[in-house]
Amino acid sequence: MIRSMTGYGKSQDIIDGREISVEIRSVNHRYYEFNSRIPRAYGYLEEKIKTLLHKNISRGKIEVSVMINNIENSDYSVQLNKQILSEYINALSEVSVNGIDTEKIGRFYPENDLSLSNIMRIPEIFTVVKKQDDEEKIWNAVKTVTEKSLEKFIYMRETEGESLKNDIIQRLNHILDMVNIIETLEPESVKMYRERLYNKLLEVLESSDINEQRIITETALFCDKVAVNEETVRLKSHINQIISLLDSEDIVGKKTDFIIQEMNREVNTIGSKSQSIDITRIVVDLKSEIEKIREQIQNIE
């Protein structure tokens, strides 16, 4: 199925106590380009997401945003430094044992006062430590949400791709109609040109001893060079090729773009060879339609 290179998909879920949100968007690009916004603590997810998406996306500038919030458990734990606390207790005991006047220092360290508020004042008594992530578990959770976002993203691409396909086929049919008109006009155009050329040669060479049959032969050979039937046949072939590609399951953007370039060359050749004003006018319309198709194809994956 034809896919547009423009797409968007977002999904969010709560898995294993984490709220996870993944947003995917893309715009046109010649190749596959990946950019992401992922919390630094989960940087290891970037390459995994890039690989996952690349298996399903061949072209486009892809931007992915990932948000992970721990809603049930904290990412950090507070640990008590029992060694330091023990040293402080020992020091306070030593103050009492050595008979130091605790009356004088009581307002700072009351004897046997080990309330929580006092413990909290002790430097380095508590240490904040980040919990070790289970990277595989987190990746599986993020992967689940990413796949849901990817499904929505691809659906949007395919929906827009179908619209592009219909528009392109409609324009190709219009081009085919114009090519058929050119084929109808072309024989009469060549005949009229042959007659004009023949009469002009007779006028120029009427005083010379030139064989009339030779003039007729040379005129016919020259007129064959201005005939455009070969170009119209190739144009029809290119149109059929594009329609076949649009109906295939392959990635067709680059192939179709190449065929459009070939169509443009054929039309330019018709314009340079034709001696008919009517055909010249049709050539202008053909170029316009081909350019519109080329712009649409730039959006196809």
Image (spheres, rainbow, N blue to C red):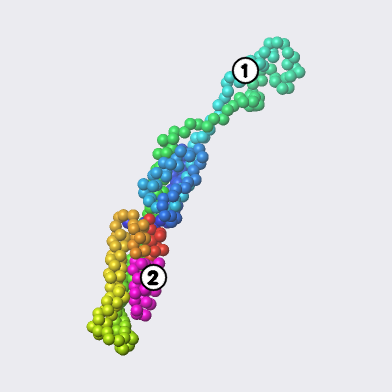
Q: Is residue 8 left or right of residue 175?
A: right
Q: Is residue 28 left or right of residue 245?
A: right
Q: Which residue is mark 2?
A: 287
Regarding residue 23, the answer to whether it shows in the image is: no
Q: Tag 2: residue type?
A: Lys
Q: Quick one: which residue is furthest to the top in this view? A: 98
Q: Main secondary structure of the magenta part?
A: helix
Which is in the foreground here, disc 2 or disc 1? 2
Residue range corresponding to the magenta coloring? 263-292
Q: Position of residue 110 (x, y in %)?
A: 70, 20
**Residue 87 tag number:** 1
Q: Pick the residue in front: 236 or 190.
A: 190
Q: Disc count in the image?
A: 2
Q: Quick one: which residue is furthest to the front in this view? A: 209
Q: Tag 1: residue type?
A: Glu
Quadrant placement of the N terminus: bottom left
Q: Is residue 271 magenta?
A: yes
For label 1, the SS is helix
